[in-house]
Amino acid sequence: MINVAFVCLGNICRSPMAELIFKNMIEERELSSSFNVTSFGTSDCEEGNPIYPPAKKTLIMHGIAGNHIAKQISLFDIKNNDFILCMDNSNYYNLLQLAGESYAHKVFKLCSLTDNPRDVADPWYTRDFERAFADISDGCRAFLEFVLKDRAEAINYDKRH
Ligand code: 4NP
């Protein structure tokens, strides 16, 4: 089992989009039983709120449904996940502070795994939810390819048992 947490600032736009996009990708490849996937915000500013409606609408336009309630990440969550995948430099430095030296190796920017490393710009400010969807999808594809190579044994074990 591979535990994956997507992280942004508020946990109402980018990281719940990433959670649902990645869940959809692994479902299509019949890999859902090998992963636990969730998402968090570095801030508690949106704690308890559902996915922001324009983000949810963008997902639905791409055939992806699902719900999420915003929650703030804690050190406990960092300890309990194998990969912490965030959206931008600000998330990254906030997470490194929380993770400390012991867990810093778990923290990545999602699109740093692609051929074109970049931040996922915050659509809360840019209003470009399609751009966020495209960048997050690219990052999720790259992460899945990475993990299928890097953690192939864990996934094959889960598929057999
Ligand atoms: P997210 O976007 O980090 O992609 O969920 C934001 C949502 C809400 C706020 C900031 C960013 N806010 O300031 O409330």
Image (cartoon, rainbow, N blue to C red):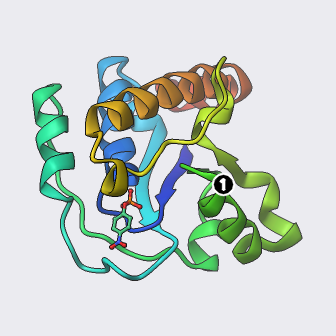
* Foreground pick, 80 / 132: 132
Point out residue 121 in the picture as x, y percentages from the top left corner.
47, 45
Q: Is residue 158 left or right of residue 112?
A: left
* Residue at point 61%, 22% (across, down): 148
Q: Quadrant of residue 152?
A: top right
Question: Where, quadrant-wise, is the N terminus in this rendering?
Answer: top right
Question: Is 79 drawn above or below residue 115 in the view shown?
Answer: below
| Count of numbered tags | 1
Question: Is 57 drawn above or below residue 90 in the view shown?
Answer: above
* Foreground pick, 8 / 78: 8
Question: Is 114 drawn above or below residue 161 in the view shown?
Answer: above
Q: Which residue is mark 1?
A: 89
* Residue at point 80%, 60% (across, down): 104
Mark 1: C-beta under 8 Å from nearest atom of ligand 1: no
* Foreground pick, 33 / 44: 44
Which residue type carries mark 1? Answer: Asn
Outermost residue to the front: 126
Q: Is residue 67 left or right of residue 25?
A: left
Point out residue 11 in the picture as x, y percentages from the top left corner.
37, 64
Point out residue 50 in the picture as x, y percentages from the top left corner.
18, 66
Q: Quadrant of ligand 1?
A: bottom left
* Residue at point 42%, 51% (across, down): 122
Secondary element under disc 1, as helix, strand or loop, is helix
* Residue at point 65%, 52% (across, down): 82
Q: Quadrant of residue 63?
A: top left
Q: Is residue 6 left or right of residue 27?
A: right
Point out residue 64 in the picture as x, y percentages from the top left corner.
18, 33
Outermost residue to the right: 101
